[in-house]
Structures are given as structure tokens and as C-alpha cells.
Image: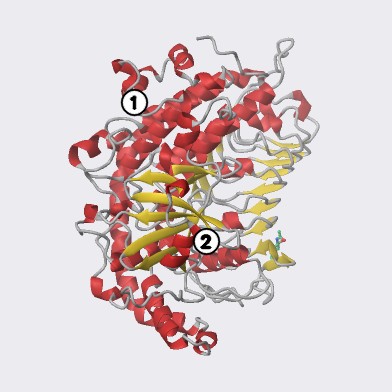
Amino acid sequence: MRMRMWVLLLLVLAPSSVNGDTDQSHASALRIMYQGLNSPGQLTKWTSNGGDPCGDNWKGVKCSGSRVTEINLSGLGLSGNLGYQLTSLTSLTNFDMSNNNLGNEIPYNLPPNLQRLNFAGCGFHGSLPYSISLMTSLKYLNVAHNQINGELQDMFGKLSSLSTLDLSFNLFTGNLPESFSLLSRATDMYLQSNKFTGSIDVLADLPLKNLNVANNKFSGWVPSQLKNINLQKDGNSWNSGSAPPPPPGTPAGGRNHGNMSPSSTKNTGGVNGGVIAGIVISILVVGAVIAFFLLRKRSRKAHTDVEKMENQPFASLASEPHGIQELKSVQASIKAFEIPSSVNLKPPPLERHKSFNNDDISAKPPKKAPTNAMSYSIADLQMATNSFSADNLIGEGSTGRVFRAQFEDGKVVAVKKINSSAGAGIGISGVLSETFMDIVSDISRLRHPNVTQLVGYCCEHGQHLLVYEFLKNGSLYDLLHQSDECSRKPLTWNDRVKIALGAARALEYLHEVCLPSVIHKSVKSGNILLDSELNPRLSDCGLASLVPDADQELDSIAPEVSMSGHYTIKSDVYGFGVTMLELLTGRKPFDRLRTRSEQCLVRWATPQLHDIDALAKMVDPALKGLYPVKSLSRFADVIALCVQPEPEFRPPMSEVVEALVRLLQRTDMSKRTLGNDVRPHDG
Ligand SMILES: *[C@@H]1O[C@H](CO)[C@@H](O)[C@H](O)[C@H]1NC(C)=O
């Protein structure tokens, strides 16, 4: 399990005001990084609250215009973690954190467009994150002198710019991955002092000038192509005598094709094997973290209040006609949004939000509210939805109806009208305004590219509404099951994998990045919305407390939930598996119109998931046989793990994400190295 995730979540604070030259998302990533590093004094000018990294010359930060392009904090004795928002640093090309004491694992979320990444001597353990495989601009990668272990995944296929790779002085095991042979610009490779095994044949045709493979467990012969470069090879068990001539017509990398299947079987086994230990560890860790968090929250509360007050622009409000009332209201909201409160734990004591009754948030929304969620008036929303007319109804779920709303300025949003009966699940009859504001506060903090973004709310006259960004392509359910087949292009196989991966990342975020974990409770294709490029966004995140326990449709619900009514992150994983099954088969989770044995999708499909021929018959006919067979069967393997009846054997979402990323990678690889892997549908 990823302990680092839990630890870095201690540091989530309410968003602070932003001013200055630096791109907001870049500045925010740096502030979160600063908090993660425990706000060290040696980072002069840095602050976790406001400040302007580019304008104020933060130590080690270089910018181009408003964009952060370089961070070099090498050898500053830093400890802690790098925060969870590094993916926002889209202009960063040079990232040097070498020789610090970061410990833990290398974060999965890294700046995506790096050219140079130096994590040497950081005390990292665990494995190399698969996200590195997507950094196609990478020229220099150095993770030497850490304790990184395990086998290298086949993750180098797209790194065709990489010229220097330094993995030396770690604990890597296993054979060199096949995709090393695709590092067509590699001139310098340092693999010394690990526990690599097998031959180094995959390196034979690379344009290497310097190669150090000393002190490993390599065997076989040194390829003749490497004999005239600067090669260090002592401390291995090379075969003596001269190398046998290669069999005629064998390309250098050819021998490895058989490697992939065994390693994938092994990985799949690993998912199960580690789960029990993982659960035990995570329970201990979560317990400790919650205790720590509560203590820390208590001791910091007074201090944070003051800090927050100082950072709010009261002056401008006070001069306006309704200044005083708004001021009160802003102060109240500051309290409400102050510190992450629980999402799934018990609701906080009610008196904390006493000031939040309907009169406080009247038709005048507080300007510059301390979150990005705006307060809307019911009158505005009524106008924008044509009085919530049936024409504007775009969806209906167990928590309420969703309407399309268009404001006078042309802006389109989706408005969710919370059912007055919702909330029964947490034992309150009807939604109390206080509880509602807690929910708004919690979901306004959820920020992830694959999670629908809350833009506002309305809490007036006993009505409770949530305002979200509007997504053009509707829900995955509609696209798969209700689109008019003539009018719409069916989803391609790649679209489907991409949608599954995005949705998996959203759940990984809710389960493993948020603290406390956010259980979604209602993971299904109807809650996966798609933007105009078919990027998925998980909707209804943070609304679990409004989902009635008894009232869930039984289609995609985990067996233990239908028996006990008790939801866990593992019941979300099950719902995700069902969604993947819908993607694979194009069938609804439950379809009355089919013959009895085929009505329940999970029951019908799971016994056949490991049978390639059965799979070819199960796959959505709309794909017309256009899918890579291997990719299909790996997709099916992931499904089989997710829909296991025993919740404890279902993998954590981070493992699902990694499996799907690997699957995408291998599909690409097989296109390049094995020729066309697509075969026509033969069922
Ligand atoms: C970062 O700074 C260190 C020491 O100040 C220097 O040796 C190193 O070359 C710098 N790294 C990069 C990538 O510029």
C-alpha cells in the first residue's frame, strides 16, 4: 500500500488566495510541495500561503513568463514529500531534487513534460512509477543511489528521447525489460550495483557510448556490438568462451516476446498476495494518521483562524452597500471551509455551523467566497433552467434530478436538485442546511481531472442545489446503451480503455489520495460523464452521505453491500469492475430483455473472463472485431479481479490504474514490435 499517500494528505488545507504573476495551478502545486516538505526555512521566499513563485524569486525556481519551468532543490537537506499536485506543473522541464532525504516512494503524479528528472540519492524505495513511461520528452532520468526494488516494468517504449538513464546503486532485480531495446537515443546507461539477472542482449543495438553493468547478476555473453564502447562489466557471471552466433534472422529483441505473459501472470498474482498484508497495514496506518490529524487539528485551529482572516479581502467588501451582512457571511463561510472535515465519518457537531441558516446566505452571494464554489440564488437557477422544466432534465439518480442550466451570459452548467428525502442514509430526515454546507465544503475541495468539478451551490428556502460544470457527451451509460446506433459513432477499443483508466484514476484519488478516504457508493456508468474529447469525469463524488442505503438499484452493487448495506472502498471497486464489463460487452448491468441466464451481466460474464474464445464472443459487437486480442484479455483479467465476491481480494484502485496503464503501454508496444495485433472478430 502507499503509505506516502496517507501521509501527504495531512497537509491538505483550504485553498488560499492567489495573487501575483505565476500561473495559479503552478503556484498552488509549489505551495503544496512546500507544505509536503514541512515548510523548511532553507527554501527562502517559499510560502504555503499566497506568494508568487515567479515574481518573488522563490529559491531554486525558474520561470518563463508566468510558467514554472525549472525546480532545482538539490542537496538542501530537505525531508518530507513533494505534494500531490505535481502533474499541474505542465511547463516544468527540469526537476532536480537529488540528494535530499525524501524517503518513501517516488510519487506517481509527476510533472508530465519533464526533460530532466533527477531523484538521485533521495532515499526512495518501492518501484519506479509507471507514469514515467508517459514522459515522452524525457532526455535524462537519474534515480541512482536509492533503494528502489523489484523488476523493471516494460515502460520504456515511448522514451525515445532518453539519452541518459542512471539506475545504479539500487535494488532492482529481474531481467532487463524488452522495451530497453526501443531507447533509440540512449548513449549513457548506468545499471551498476543492482541485482539484475539474465543477459544484456536488449542493449546490443542501442547507440551507447558509456555502459556500466558492473556488480549485478548478469549472465550470458556480452554482445559484440558493445565491445568497443566504454563498458564496465565486472562483478557478473558472464559465460566464458565465445558467444554462439545468433540464429539467422532473429532480431536482437526477438527472444523476449514470450516474457510478457509470464510476467503478467505474476503481476496478477501479486495483486492478491499483497492484499491481506496491505489491509492490515493500512488499518494501522489510517488509525495512526487519524489520531495524529485530530491532535494536530486541535492544536492548530486557533492559529489557522487568524491566518485565514488575515488573508481575506474584507476591505473591498466593507465599502459595498451590503458589506456588513456579506462580511458576516464570509466570516461564517471561512469557518465552514476552514479545514477538511470528515466526508464519511460522522457529521461534525452541528453548532459549528449554526451561523449557516438560510438567512445568512440570502440572495446576495458572498463575493470572493473562500472556495471556488459560488453561492447562487434560487431565482437565478430557476431562470436558467426555465423553472426546472422537463426539457432541461438531463439525468436522474438516487440523490436527485439534474438539469441543464444556461445563464444570460451563455454559460451552461448542470444543476443537481437534491431530493428532500435524500440524507436518510445518515439518519437525518431531509437535508439539514448545516449538513448540506458540510457536503458543499467537502466536495468543493475535490480536485481531479477525472472528477466533475463543483462550481457552486444554492441553499435557500429549504432547497439544496449543487451546480457543476456541464459535460457535453452525457453519461457513459447513455453512450453505451441508449445512443441511437445510426447517429453516433460507437466507442472504439482505445476510447474504452481510456475511459476505464480515467475513471480508475478518479477512484484512486478518492480512495487513496483523499483523507479520510472518500467512498463513492454509486460507481456505475451512469455516473461517468464524458467531455467533448471523451475524457471521463466521475460525478456525484462526495455525495455518499445522501445516497440512501436501502434504495440502491441492485444492478452494479457488490454482493456484500446487498447483504449488509455496508459500503466500503472495495464495494466501489466492484462497481468499477461492473462498469468495465459494460465497456467490454456493451451490455447493461441488468437487462430484462435477455434470456434469464444472460440478464445479470456479472453472473453471465465472469465465468468466461479467462477464456479467450469466449471473450471474443462476449465482446461488444459494435466494435466489429477491432480490438487487440491481448489488450482485451488483459482488460478482462482486471475485471475478474474487481468483481470477485470477496471484497478483501479486490485490488486497491492504484493497482487497477497501474494495470490499465501497463495494458495501454503494451498495446502500443505490440503495435510497434509485433506488428498488427488486431484480428477480426471470429465469433
Ligand atoms: C542544481 O543545483 C546543483 C547545486 O546547486 C547543481 O550542481 C546542479 O547541476 C543543478 N542541477 C541542474 C539540473 O541544473
Q: Going by the picture, which residue comes out furthest to the bottom? A: 319
Residue neighbourhood size for the residue with mark 2, other residues' Cα within 10 Å, grouped as few (<14), some (14–19), many (≥20): some
Question: As rendered, which of 69 and 378 lies closer to the eye?
Answer: 378
Quick one: label 1, few (<14), some, or many (20+) residues within 10 Å? many
> At 25% from the left edge and 48% from the top edge, which residue is drawn?
548
Q: Can you give x and y, in whole percent of width and height, for residue 447 in the image?
A: 49, 57
Q: Which mark is residue 101?
A: 2
Q: Quadrant of residue 645?
A: top left
Label 1: state its secondary structure.
helix
The quarter of the picture showing ligand 1: bottom right
Mark 1 Cβ and ligand 1 under 8 Å apart: no
- The residue that appears at 45% across and 23% down in the rendered structure is 585
Q: What residue would you read off at disc 1?
A: 602
Marks 1 and 2 close (CB-CB < 8 Å): no
Is 588 situated above or below 133? above
User: Is residue 176 in view from this perspective?
Assistant: no
